[in-house]
Amino acid sequence: MFEGHHFYLVDEQVQLLRHLRRYCELHLARWRNSASRQLNRAAG
């Protein structure tokens, strides 16, 4: 009983970490795009 519950919690944490990683990747990509646009604007 406890083992099954433990595995359920671990699976939930794995899904949460996967979601956080995806969110961070999207956020970093958006930040990089906006930063490069500002750099191009300052250089151009």
Image (spheres, grey):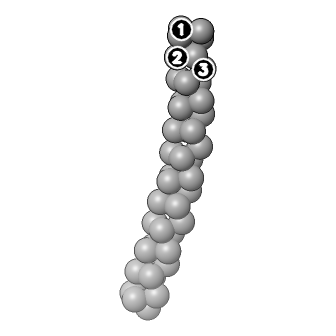
Quadrant (top left, top right, bottom left, bottom right) of the C terminus: top right
**Structural distance between the alpha carbons of marks 1 and 3:** 9 Å
Quadrant (top left, top right, bottom left, bottom right) of the N terminus: bottom left
For disc 1, the neighbor class at 10 Å (few under 14, some 14 to 19, many from 20) is few
- Label 2's element? helix
* Circle number at residue 39: 2
x 51%, y 52%: residue: 20
The answer to the question of whether label 2 and label 1 lie on touching residues, with beta carbons closer than 8 A, is yes
Report the number of numbered marks: 3
Residue that badge 3 annotates = 37
**Residue 18, horizontal then vertical, whole percent:** 52, 61
**Residue 38, horizontal then vertical, whole percent:** 56, 15
In the image shown, does 5 or 7 lie closer to the viewer? Answer: 7
- Label 1's element? helix
**Residue 42, horizontal then vertical, whole percent:** 53, 8
The answer to the question of whether label 3 and label 2 lie on touching residues, with beta carbons closer than 8 A, is yes
Residue that badge 1 annotates = 42
* Residue type indicated by callout 1: Ala
For disc 3, the neighbor class at 10 Å (few under 14, some 14 to 19, many from 20) is few
**Structural distance between the alpha carbons of marks 3 and 2:** 5 Å
* Residue type indicated by callout 3: Arg
- Label 3's element? helix
* Residue type indicated by callout 2: Leu
For disc 2, the neighbor class at 10 Å (few under 14, some 14 to 19, many from 20) is few
**Residue 36, horizontal then vertical, whole percent:** 55, 24
| Residue 22 as seen in the image, left or right of residue 5 | right
Q: Is residue 2 above or below residue 34?
A: below
